[in-house]
Structures are given as structure tokens and as C-alpha cells.
Amino acid sequence: MVNRITGFSNVFDIDEIVSKLMKTEQAPLDKMTRQKQTLEWQRDSYREVNSKVKELGDLISSLSLGYPSTYGAKKVTSSNEAAVTATGSTNATSGSIHVTQLATASVFKSSGTSGFTPANGTFTFEVTTPDSTKPKTVTINTSDSDTIDDIVKRLNNSQLGVTAYKGQIFDGTNYVDTIALTSRTTGEGVNIKAADGNSASFLTQLGFQVDGDNKLVATTQGQKAQYEINGLKMENNNNTFTQAGITYELKGTTDQPVSLNVSTDVDAIFDKIKQFVDKYNELVEQINGKVNEKRNRDYQPLTAEEKKGMSDKEVELWETTAKSGLLRSDAILRSGASKMRSDFYAEITTSDANKIQITQIGIATSDKYKDGGKLVIDDNKLRKAIEEDPQKISQMFISGSLNVDSKDKDKAQQQYKEQGIIYRVQNSLTAFSKSIQTKAGSTTMELKEYGLGKNLDSLGKRMSTFQDRLKMVEARYYKKFNAMDSAIQKLNNQSGYLSQLLGQ
């Protein structure tokens, strides 16, 4: 704020007069300020819709709705879940498994820790696991202040691939303070070898036994899982493994073969389709809210001066009303919503020339007017369709190709007819989002890169120019009134002087 020394005539208040005059001069700037706020609200309203568009696109990706495996999900039922559980992929088939031995981990147990002496040192080991092709070099550093508990912690935090435990462990006669190492991998072939004599001495001080090759001697050797799948004898270093499209988890041995029945996972497929429809309905609801919202032109954005005379709650309520209807009947939103509705309801031509439509599997438009085109699911009909013909469900959502020929219009139309709903909607979401960004941009875009931004940029420049003009006008008013005040003061002085003369 400019500091000014105004007149001393006491005939009028120059600051007050100039302030009132400037309110009139300020009117065009206030109008531009309201226009700017309206544009910013409109931009933000577009971006709110675009965030919902992105949410739907992200959900399609996170649920893997564009992949055949989603619609071919299998459920595997075990006749003995205490011993074997399993999950299946799209090519899984029913069968049986007989488990004769579980995979176990190697265990290394010390004979006591009484010979340990802490020292500063670096110890190197070569570690081999059942699945490794060559040993991995691991280094452990110790200090002369380390306790046994510190050593145990260092072993656990190292890359030795073991879980270390210290406690009173029974040695066959007594419970002795002992360190036990359990391999974190199951199966045969776990080896921990000291790379030199110093490292071997470190192990022996802790009470472990090493052989002539400086390898840690296991108290219990790890073993492979052994089993028969459909009568075929096999083995694996792990209790969890995948074979012929089924992922097995072995929990115990069995006296007889365990039956594994593979069927379509109706619940998994249904839940993903329902999540997709629910998220689509959220987008439809938001679009309908924007394009049908009533515009109240009696409520314009408030200026800073107007806000001073209102409480925070009053400002909030006023602005809520002022923001409403900014996208009423908006062409971009209406077009985007219309395109997605047609994506759902246009017939799909499958690779075997059949024509299918989403209503055939229990998904249709709500018959309630206020729902504005939301989808509703007939749960029983959809579940039945998934159970009876999962291939048709897959065709409904992901037949054809995601991409269409952008150069050949006729070919593109034919490709669209062959596209499943997910592919159609994905392309429409991309185009919809691009249209919104062209109009309202994104948080990472500059003003000059989108339509409303250009308007905001132009308006901002006009406001800046007008503010400079207001400063000049205000300075001119002060100059005039200060001159007037000086003249009045001079006149008052002369009048006083004459009064003194006449009074003599």
C-alpha cells in the first residue's frame, strides 16, 4: 500500500472520497475477477470428472479385466484341505495327488557357545541353495564388543539365508545354551562353506561343526517333497509349486490320493464384473450430476471485499451455490457418457460370427429415470451365465482387439463391432479424458496448453493491465484532491488574515 500525506483543511476526507470513487473504477476489475473464479471452478469441475474417468481406467487395469485369465478363473476344491490346498489357472483340470514326503529345511545346531570370544573381524562364506547355480559370497563383520545375542542378530541380518535362534536347547542329556540355524529354503543342497580358516574358526567358536572342506555340518539335512500326481511320481524342493496349471500347497503327507476338483470360479469372475459395473455407475452418476445441475446466476463469485462482511460458513454456502451448474448440458460430458453407453449396448460379433449383447448375461440399463443410464446386474442370471459358458463371458468383454485402424474408417467400424466391452470402454475413456484435458488441462499442464487455460491467461493479462490503470487513476484522484485541499487551506489562511485586519 502506498503511504500518502493527505490534506489538512479538515473540509473533507480525501481517503474516503478517493476510496468511494475507486469502487466505481474497480467495477470492471471485480467483474473480471468473478469471471476468472468462474473459469477456475469450471476447470476444476471438469477435472473432477476426469479423475473419475481415470479411476475407472485404473480399475480395469488393477482387476486385469483385459486378460483372458480373468474370465477363465478356476476354483480348485481339495478332498483333504488339511493336507493339500490348490489354486488353478485357466488350463487347470481335475486330478489327484498323493503326498508321501514334505519338503523340509536344513538345520544346523551348535554344541554350545562357551568357546566364543568377541573380536573385530570380517568373515566370508559361500552359500549354496537348492535352486542356485553357483555359490553366493556372504560377508559378516563383528566387533570386540559383540555379545552372543549381537552375533545372532548379525546372522539373521546377513545374506546367509538362515534364521538364527539362541536358547536352551536339549542336546539329548541336558538343556544347553545353543545357537540353531534353520535354512529359509527347503529341499536338498543347502550348503554354507567358510571361505578361509579364519571364517571356519568363527563357526567353531560358536559351537558349530565344520567338515574337512570347511562346510557347516547339518544336524538335519533338508529333503525334497515327494508325491504322485495322477499316479506319476515326482519331487520338488518346495512344498508350494505349480504343475499343469495347478498351484499346489502341501501341508502334510496323505494315506491315500487327495482328489482335486477344478471348476469355474464363478464368485471371482462375478465380483470383478460387479466392481467394474459399480465404478462405471459412479462415473455416470457424477456426469449426470454435472450436466443436470441447476445454474443459479443470482450467485456470482464473491470478491475479497464482499467476503470480509461474511462468516466462513456463509462464504462456503454462497460458493457452493455459485459453483453449481457450471457444466450444465456440457457437450463434452454428454458426448463421453453417450459413447460409453453405446459401447455397452452395441452388438458384439464374435470370431465364429455370432452376435451377442450384454443383456444376455444379466446386465441392463436401470429402468429408473433418476438413475440416468446406470447399469443394473441380475445377480442370478449373471452367475448362471458365468457358470454355464465362461467363454461367452470372455467374448462379451475382451473379444477382438484393443486397437482399431485409425486410418481406415470402414475397417475401424468392423473392428469396433468385433470388440468386447472392456476394449471399447478403454478406448472411449482414453478419448474422453483427452477431450476433457483439451478443455480443462491437468495439474501438470501450463495455461497455454488447454482451452480454459488460454482464457485464464488472457484474462489474467487484462486484469494486470487494468490494475496498472487503476493505480494511475487513484494517483490522479489523490493529486487532484490534494491540490484542492491545498487551495482550500490557502484560502482559509487568507480569510483568517483578512479577518484579523478587519477586526483591528
Image (cartoon, grey):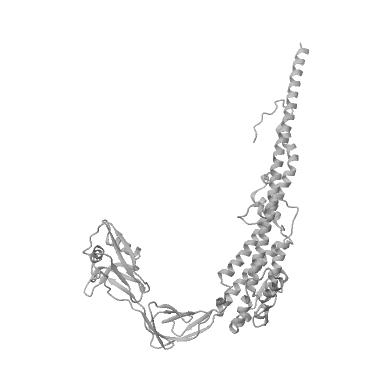
Residue 491: quadrant of the picture: top right
Residue 139: quadrant of the picture: bottom left
Q: Is residue 166 above or below residue 347?
A: above
What is the number of callouts on the image? 0
- Please tell me which residue lies in front, 342 or 9: 342
Q: In which quarter of the image is the N terminus?
A: top right
- Please tell me which residue lies in front, 131 or 452: 131
Residue 85 x, y percent position in the rendering: 45, 80
**Which residue sits at x=61%, y=71%?**
276
Seen as rendered, the residue at the extreme right is 502
Q: In this view, does 288 lie above or below 13?
A: below
Residue 13 x, y percent position in the rendering: 72, 31
Residue 196 x, y percent position in the rendering: 26, 64
**Which residue sits at x=67%, y=64%?**
432
The answer to whether residue 302 is seen in the rendering is no
**Which residue sits at x=58%, y=66%?**
58
Q: In this view, does 34 lie above or below 392?
A: above
In the image, is 289 to the left or to the right of 502? left
In the image, is 125 to the left or to the right of 433? left
In the image, is 150 to the left or to the right of 289? left
Q: In this view, does 313 lie above or below 345?
A: above
- Please tell me which residue lies in front, 164 or 366: 164
Seen as rendered, the residue at the extreme front is 407
Q: In which quarter of the image is the C terminus?
A: top right
The answer to whether residue 70 is seen in the rendering is yes
In the image, is 282 to the left or to the right of 104? right
Seen as rendered, the residue at the extreme top is 504
Residue 322: quadrant of the picture: bottom right
Residue 68 x, y percent position in the rendering: 57, 77
